[in-house]
Structure formats: C-alpha cells, structure tokens
Image: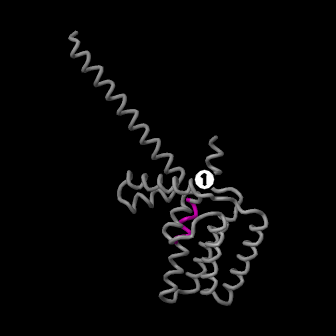
Amino acid sequence: MDPTVIGLIVLAVAVLIIGGLWFASRKKKSETLQERFGPEYERSVRQTGKRSEAEKDLEQRAERVDKLHIRELDPEEQARFSQNWKQVQSHFVDEPAVAIGEADGLVQEVMNTRGYPVTDFDQQAADISVNHPDVVTHYRAGHEIAQRHASKSVGTEELRQAILHYRALFDQLLGAVSASSNSHRRKS
C-alpha cells in the first residue's frame, strides 16, 4: 500500500479518536455540571440561550466561590440564628410585610457570617447556587415577592410563600454540611 494512503488513514483515525475523546470529555463535563447545579444548570442554559455559555458561567461561579472563605456556623451561631428565625415567624402573624424584610435581612446576615460576600442580589444568588443549588430558586422566589411587595402591596398568601422560600434557604445555610459537599463526599 502507498505510504501516503497509510499516512492519511492513520491521520484520519487519529482525528477520529481525538474528536471522540474531546466529545466524551465535553459530555462528561456537562453531566458533572448538571449534577452539581441541578435546576440551576437548566435555568442558566435558558437564561443565556447557549449551553457552552451557561457552562462557562457556572464554572466561573464555582471558581469564585472556591476562592471565598465559606465556613460552617458554630453551634452558638446556629442557636442564635434559629432563635432570630423564630422571632421572624412570630412577627409574621401580626405584621407579615415587616417579617418579610426581617427574613431577607436574617438570610443575608447568615450568608455574611458564613463568608458569602454581601453584594448585589444577583451575585449573592449566583454564589449561593454553587453550594446550595437546590434552594437558590427559593431565594430568588422569596426575594421577587419581597421586591413586588416593596413597590405594591401583595396579599398575605404571597407573603407567606415568601417566608417559606426564605425558610428553605435559611435551613440550608444553617445546616452543618452544604449540599454540594455532601454529594461530592458520597461519590468518593
């Protein structure tokens, strides 16, 4: 057989193998991000309109949060924040609108204590999505209701829903182990 033909065949096979490895690597990367970020992955894809752009954004979030000094709360802090949450809930009975602001403030205080930078809401939600992807949707929903209430009055049922959304995130933030740390440990 002609050496040129053999060379072309070897080159074609090499290109196919490299292409296959690249494709498998991209697929594995996508699966890993989908597993880590859960519903936040699909939200990010919808928001950007491109899977590659969404994946790049999610990777950047993870890198950013990895550089932060996120810590768990000590038992005294957990007890204090739990007591503060009980006060928020008791205020809801008489003044639901005030309780929403208190819930938002308390969640931000817990995030700050844990080491999440208190910046704008979108950045906070992005940071929270790295370690708590299952509840960041609650944070967004609670915040959205609180924002609507600030510009116009919303009903008590919507305010109750906001409290429930804030509570879901609050419980995760108060916990001893983050959701992503748990899932990574189970695979090891």
Callout 1, which amino acid? Ser
Q: Quadrant of residue 142?
A: bottom right
Q: Quadrant of the C terminus?
A: top right
Quadrant of the snapshot with the N terminus: top left
Relative vertical location of residue 124 with respect to residue 104 in this rendering, above or below: above
Question: Viewer-proximal residue, 58 or 13?
Answer: 58
Q: Which residues are magenta?
A: 133-140
Q: Nearer the viewer, residue 163 or 53?
A: 53
Q: How far across and down, in percent of the image, does residue 99 sit?
A: 64, 83
Majority secondary structure of magenta residues: helix
Q: Assess whether residue 138 is covered by the magenta stretch.
A: yes
36 to 27, vertically: above or below: below
Residue 117 coordinates in the image, percent (x, y): 57, 66
Q: Quadrant of residue 85?
A: bottom right
Please, what secondary structure does the residue beneath circle 1 have?
helix
> Label 1 belongs to which residue?
180
Image coords of residue 74 (percent x, y):
75, 62
Quadrant location of residue 95? bottom right
Residue shown at the point (62%, 58%) measured from the top left: 69
